Amino acid sequence: MAFLRWSCEDVAHWIESVGFPQYKACFTQNYITGRKLIHVNCFNLPRLGITDFQHMKLISAQVRELLGVSEPRWNQSIAEPLHDDRTVFLQMKSRTGQQADSLTHEHLLKNKSK
C-alpha cells in the first residue's frame, strides 16, 4: 500500500499515467495525497473540478483498482455493513495522526474479531 505515502505530486503523476493528464492540476490544487485517494469517487470528483461523467466513472474505477476495493453495490440492503474490511482499513488510514499511522490491517482484523 505504497500509495498511502504518495504526495500530491505523486498522485498527479498517477492520474496522468492512467490517461488523464488534464486533471493533474485538479488533484494538486486540492492537495489530494495518497491518503486522500480513498475519498475520491464520483460523488467527490466534481468538487475537484472534474465534471465529465465518463471521466468521473473511469477515474473512480482506477482509484478502486489502485486501492484494491470493489465497486459499491447500490442494491445492497441498508441493514448490511457498508464496506469490506479493506475499505474500512483504508478509511482509517486516510486520517492523520499517530493512531492512524501505526494501524495495520492485521491489527484491525484482530480487534474486529474480539
Image (cartoon, helix red, strand yellow):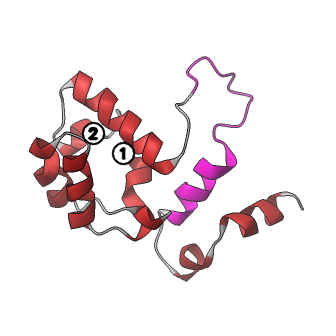
Element under label 2? helix
Tell which of 64 and 99 is nearer to you. 64
The answer to whether residue 48 is magenta is no
Magenta-highlighted residues: 73-93
Left/right placement of residue 18 relative to residue 64 reads left
> Crowdedness of circle 2 by 10 Å Cα count: few (<14), some, many (20+)?
many
Please provide percent x and percent y for residue 106: 73, 66
- Residue pushed farthest bottom? 98
Q: Whole-Å distance between the Cαs marked 1 and 2? A: 6 Å
Residue 60 sits in which quadrant? Answer: top left
| Disc 1 secondary structure class | loop
Image quadrant of residue 55?
top left
* Left or right: 59, with 65 as reference point: left
**Quadrant where the C terminus is found in the figure:** bottom right
Residue at the (63%, 51%) spot, across then down: 86
Q: Going from the N terminus, do you reach mark 1 or mark 2 first?
A: 1
In the picture provided, is 76 more to the left or to the right than 54? right
Instruction: Give yes or no for contact between labels 1 and 2 (Cβ–Cβ under 8 Å).
Output: yes
Which residue corresponds to the image point at 68% horizontal and 26% vertical from the top-left? 78
Residue occupying the point 58% across, 24% down: 73
Residue under pointer 1: 40
Residue type for callout 2 = Leu
Percent position of residue 62, x then y: 37, 39
* Mark 1 residue crowding within 10 angstroms, few (<14) / some (14–19) / many (20+): some
Residue 74: numbered disc: none
| Amino acid beneath label 1 | Val
Residue 61 screen position, x and y as percent:
40, 34
- Residue 71 percent coordinates (x, y): 52, 31
Eyeballing the image, is 112 above or below 81? below
Front residue of 58 and 81: 58
| Residue farthest along the right direction in this orientation | 114
- Quickly name the residue at label 2: 45
